[in-house]
Image (cartoon, rainbow, N blue to C red):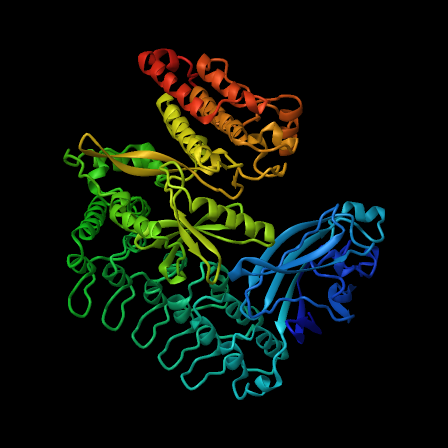
Amino acid sequence: MSITRKSLTEGKGPINRIIRVEIISGENLFPVAMTSGESYGKRININQLLPFNTNHIKSFELEPIEEKVSLHSEISTPVTGIVSPENIIVPSTQISQTNITNSMTLLRLEKTQQFTTISAPLPSSTPIKMTPMKKKMSPSKLATKISSEYQCHRIIQPDPLMKRISKPKITVSLYLFPEVDPKTEKSYKTLPLHSAVERSDLYKILTLLESGKVDVNAQDEQGNTALHIASYESYNEHIILALLKNAPTIDVNKENLDKNTPFHFFCKNFSNPNCQEAMELFFRHGVNLEAQNKNLETALHTVVRNNSIRMLLVSKLLERGVDVNAATNRQSTALHYAIHNERTDLLSILLEHKAKLDLPDDHGQTPFMLAKTKSERYFKTVNDFKELIDYLIEIKASDNAIAMLVKNKMFKYKLRNQTPKTLEKIGILSSVERIALIQKFKLLPNVPEVKEITENENEQEERKKLLELIEQGKFVIEPKEIEFLANIGSGASGIVYTAKYKNVTVAVKTLKATNMEEVKEFQQEYGVLSKLQHENIVRFYGVIVKKQFSMVMEYCSKGSLYDIISKKENSITWETVFDYAEQIALGMDYLHSRTPQILHRDLKSLNILVTMETIQENGNSIEIERLKICDFGLSRFDSEITTSTKDRGTYAYCAPEVYYNQRYTTQSDVYSYGIILWELIYRVIYQKYQRPFQEFPELTMDLQIIIQSATCDLRPTIPPSTPQKMATLIRQCVMKEQENRPKSGMILTALQEMKKDFKSNPQLWNASIIQQN
C-alpha cells in the first residue's frame, strides 16, 4: 500500500488530495516456486498494471522479495483537473493496442455529464497488449475507488522457461481522498474510529485500522461499536467492507445496550442491493444468526422490516439455516411479521423453510388467525398454502417435496392434474417418490379447479395507477420507493433486479458504467423508452438518480424469447411461431413508424422478453403470452447522418452494412428480424434449438460470422421442409442489399397471408415438422 499527497488545482485554487494505492492480490509472480523471480526482471512498471495517468505518479515498482511483493513510489509534479470527491465520481480507463493514451474520465453522476478528462502518453515500456481481466467501480461519498485487474502480455526478460508458465497478474485499487483539515483531525478524540465512521471518512478509517493503535471493538455510551454505526448507515457499503476486511479482531457479535449486534442493524437498515460481499464477510467472521436483542428479535425478525432489500437478505439467512420459527418476547415469529405486512413472497419463502402457521403469540393469535384480519384475497392465498401443507404432511410427503410444491404454489386443487414430469421439473428428483405422490394425488376429489387470482390480475389496478403517474410526467423515482427482490442477471450496461414499486413488480436496471460512452448509452435507452407506449415494447416507469443511477421498467416474468425456444420441454407449434413472429413485427413496425423513426440496432432473441398478460375475450379472462422488445441501449432516432459502430450488437444478427460501416437504417433491423424468424422456423421444424450459423463448424469466432455473411453472403441454412412462403420471407429479410428487404408493414401482411394458409390447410404446414427421436 502506498499513500501519496498531491497538490491539485480544483475550482479557484489548489487543494490537497491523497492518492492511495493498494495491491489487492498477485498471481503467478514467480516463474518457479521458491525462487526470487529473477527471470521476470526485478521491476514491473506500474503502467502495465494501473489505469492511472503516468504524470501523477512518477514511478512504481514491484520487487519480488522472498516471495512477497513490496510497493515503492516516487512523487513527481502536481497535476490538475481532479473533480471534487464530494460528488459521486465514475472513473474509466481506455487502453488498447492502438490507443497510445492512458486516460481517466471523471463525471458528476447526478448531472450525468462529463466533468474532466486527464490523460498522458504511455511510456515505451508499456506492454504490447493489456487485457482488462476485471473492472469494478465502487463510488463513495468521500472517495473514488478504482479496482482493476490487468494481464501483462509482454515479459521484460523472456527466456524459454517463461514461455511455459502463466503470466503475472496483479489486482490493485486506487483511492482519491480529500486531505482532512487539521481542525477536523483534532475533533477525533477518545473514539477516533467512531468519529471517522460517523463522518464517512474512509481514509481515516483505513489509516486507523492499519496503525494497529485503535480498539476496533471499543463501545460508545450506547454500547455501539464502530461497526454498529457503519451498519446503521442505510446505503454506503464501503465503510462496512473496510471494517470487516481490515480488522481481523473485529467482533461482529458485540452487543450494545439494547443487545443489538451490528448484524441486527445491517439486516434492518441496509438498502444497497449489492449486499452479498458484506453478508459473506459477516458470515466469515462468525456472526451469530440466532443472537437476540432485548426484544428477543433475531436478524430474521429485523430483516422483515427492511423496506429495501428484505427478500435478498431473507434468502441468504434461510440458506444459512437460521431458525425460521424463533420467537420474540411477545412470541411473534418472522411469519407473524410477514403476514402483518401482507407479503406473499415472504409468506412463500418462509413456509418453504418450515415456518409454522399455527404458533400463537402472547395474545394467542397464530399467523393463520392474523391472516383472517387481512384482505380477502390475501387470506385466500394463506389458506391455500395451509391446505397444501396439511395435506402433504398427512400423506407423509418428504420435506423436499413439501418445500418444492410450496415454492411453486402447487396448491391442493392443482395436484390431481400433475404428472411425474411436472414434479421432476419443479425439483422432486426421486422417481419413486414422484410415482407415489401422483398415485395419491389421483385419489383427490375431481373438483373443478378454482380459478387462481394470478399475480398479473393482482397488480392490474396498481399498474393502471402507475401508468397514470407516468402520463402525468412523473419519471424520477426516489430510492425509498423501490424494494429490491432478487438479482435476475446482468444486462449490457448494468445488473438487473426484480423489485416492488408501488405494489407492482418491476425490473430495475442499475448502471455499472466505467466510461462516458456507457453512461450516454444508458441515458439513450432511458430517452427512447420514455417516449414509447405499445403492448409489444417493454414499458418504462422511471429513473432513479440518487445513490445509483437506475432505470425502472416493466418486469417480464418468463424471461427472453431465447429462454423459451432454447428449452426442449417447451412446446413450439406453427401457431406459436405465427404468434411470436407477428408480435415482434408489430413492435418493430411501431418503432419504425415513429417520427423520427427509431432504430433498435440490437434485435435478437435475447432482447425479446416474454410475459403473461390477462385479457378479456368473449366475457372471459384468459392469459396470453405477450412478447416485448427490450434493451434499447443501442437505439437511435433516425435523425442523424451517422454510421453505426461495426462491433456493436451480436454478430449473427448484424446486417452486412454494419460490417462495411455503412449507414444503419430500419432495414438493418429487418435483417436482424429475419435471423430471429429463422430461429423460430428451425425450432418448430426440428423441435430443438440451434444457434444461427451453428451448422458451420469452421466459424469458431463470432467475428468470423459477420465477415462471412457480409463478404460471402453466408446465411443460416433454411430447413428444406420449410413451407415456400415462409422460406421466401426469411430470404427477403436477410438479403444483402437493404433496399431489397421488406418493410415491417410488408412483413406483417405476409404473416397474415401465411396464417390464413395455415388455418385452411394445417396438415400441409404440420407435415414440415420433423419428429426427433
Looking at the rendering, in which quadrant would you find the C terminus? Answer: top left
Please say if 717 is above or below 464. above
Give percent across and percent down for residue 238: 53, 67
692 and 361: which one is in front?
692
* Quadrant in the rendering for residue 422: top left
Q: How many marks?
A: 0
Give percent across and percent down for residue 259: 36, 78
| Residue 260 appears left or right of 216 | left
| Residue 558 appears left or right of 732 | left
Residue drawn where x is 47% and y is 64% of the image: 283
* Quadrant in the rendering for residue 556: top left
Looking at the rendering, in which quadrant would you find the N terminus? Answer: bottom right
Please say if 341 is above or below 592. below
Give percent across and percent down for residue 321: 38, 59
228 and 202: which one is in front?
202
Residue drawn where x is 59% and y is 87% of the image: 183
62 and 743: which one is in front?
743
In the rendered image, is residue 387 in sight? Answer: yes
Residue drawn where x is 42% and y is 82% of the image: 223
Give percent across and percent down for residue 713: 62, 21
Please say if 261 is above or below 532. below
40 and 439: which one is in front?
40
In the rendered image, is residue 568 in sight? Answer: no
| Residue 25 appears left or right of 627 | right
